[in-house]
Image: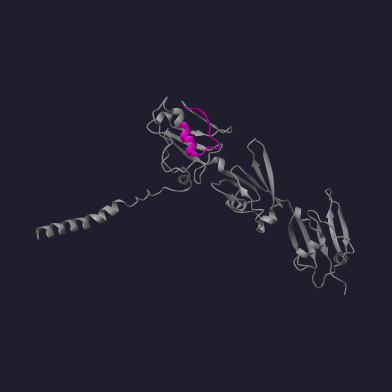
């Protein structure tokens, strides 16, 4: 009876302690406010001279940020404030630190740089230094979008981004002002640059070949096309002033078509185009649009502020 009573007490004690033990092993949630792009690339423990990097990914692995020129780095050595520095990677790719000297940081991962600094400090200056590198500003991963976009500027592109994604960061193109060829200017490792042309129409139509990958440091120029002001009046369905891109090669027939075409009272045989010289002289040039449509007469190219007049037919 005594043994049975003792066994029962131990069973009850284990049952009471089991939930407490389980709760103790649960993961502790991260403090509120942490996370985001910077934390994604800066996560992990400090690196010691021995190369132990806590939860940091292996060099070159996905998530281990590759440092570039003009990046702003917060470098800390545990318990040694005098060696902790806020440094910017120079245009030649180097940083300079007390006791450590110059290091070519451009192209290194964060964990690579932590290990390099730790090795230079140990054991001459610090025994087993704990070094951490935090990227405060991803300047090398910025792209600049200029030209016929709604919000031109520089934008961070951490990870892989396409041309369309980069343009969308600038709130998209102003279609009525955009030229035919987008230019992506890319800096090369030797200090030079190359220009990659991309057709605006191909990109807009969803051609995958036109939606090229974008790299940090790229400059995306969406050219602003000059606008021509063409006036169409007389016997057309929608007379008015039309803004046409210079690159779209506007003609008399096309201008009349944009104005809704000739109405039932108009005469396509007696159309006139008024062209004004810089000195103010106006030339009236007749054109037979019926013959143009039949291929018997060439169409007429229009310039800025040309006027197309469609008269009414004789009845």
Quadrant of the rendered structure where residue 269 is? Answer: bottom right
Residue 50, position in %: x, y? 42, 34
Image quarter of the N terminus: bottom left
Residue 35 visible in rendering: yes
In the picture provided, is 233 more to the left or to the right than 173?
A: right
Q: In this figure, what is the number of numbered marks?
A: 0
Q: Is residue 112 above or below residue 286?
A: above
Residue 141, position in %: x, y? 56, 43
Q: Is residue 118 above or below residue 304?
A: above
Q: How is the image coloured?
A: one colour
Residue 162: within the magenta? Answer: no
Image quarter of the C terminus: bottom right
Q: Which residues are magenta?
A: 100-117
Residue 101: within the magenta? Answer: yes
Residue 210, position in %: x, y? 67, 53
Residue occupying the point 88% across, 61% down: 286
Quadrant of the rendered structure where residue 266 is? Answer: bottom right
Residue 176 visible in rendering: no
Residue occupying the point 56% across, 40% down: 140
Residue occupying the point 67% across, 37% down: 192
Q: Residue furthest left?
A: 1
Q: Residue furthest right?
A: 296
Q: Nearer the viewer, residue 135 or 50?
A: 50
Residue 184, position in %: x, y? 66, 46
Q: Nearer the viewer, residue 24 or 30?
A: 24
């Amino acid at each position: 009876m005594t043994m049975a009573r003792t066994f029962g007490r131990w069973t009850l004690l284990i049952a009471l302690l089991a939930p407490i033990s389980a709760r103790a092993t649960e993961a502790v949630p991260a403090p509120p406010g942490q996370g985001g792009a910077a934390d994604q690339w800066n996560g992990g423990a400090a690196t010691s001279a021995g190369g132990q990097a806590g939860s940091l990914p292996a060099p070159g692995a996905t998530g281990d940020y590759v440092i570039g020129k003009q990046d702003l780095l917060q470098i800390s050595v545990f318990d040694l404030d005098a060696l902790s520095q806020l440094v910017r990677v120079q245009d030649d790719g180097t940083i300079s630190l007390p006791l450590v000297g110059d290091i070519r940081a451009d192209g290194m991962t964060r964990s690579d740089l932590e290990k390099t600094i730790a090795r230079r400090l140990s054991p001459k200056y610090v025994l087993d230094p704990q070094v951490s590198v935090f990227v405060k500003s991803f300047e090398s991963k910025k792209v600049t979008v200029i030209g016929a976009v709604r919000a031109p500027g520089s934008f961070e592109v951490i990870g892989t981004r396409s041309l369309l994604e980069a343009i969308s960061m600038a709130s998209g193109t102003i279609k009525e002002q955009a030229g035919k060829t987008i230019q992506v200017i890319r800096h090369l490792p030797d200090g030079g640059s190359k220009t990659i042309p991309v057709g605006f129409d191909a990109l807009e139509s969803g051609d995958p070949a036109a939606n090229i990958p974008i790299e940090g440091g790229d400059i995306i120029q969406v050219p602003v096309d000059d606008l021509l002001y063409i006036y169409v009046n007389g016997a057309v369905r929608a007379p008015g002033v039309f803004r046409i891109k210079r690159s779209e090669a506007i003609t008399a027939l096309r201008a009349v078509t944009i104005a809704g075409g000739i109405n039932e009272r108009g005469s396509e045989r007696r159309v006139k185009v008024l062209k004004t010289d810089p000195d103010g002289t106006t030339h009236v040039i007749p054109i037979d649009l019926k013959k143009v449509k039949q291929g018997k007469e060439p169409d007429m190219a229009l310039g800025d502020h040309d006027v197309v007049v469609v008269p009414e037919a004789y009845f």
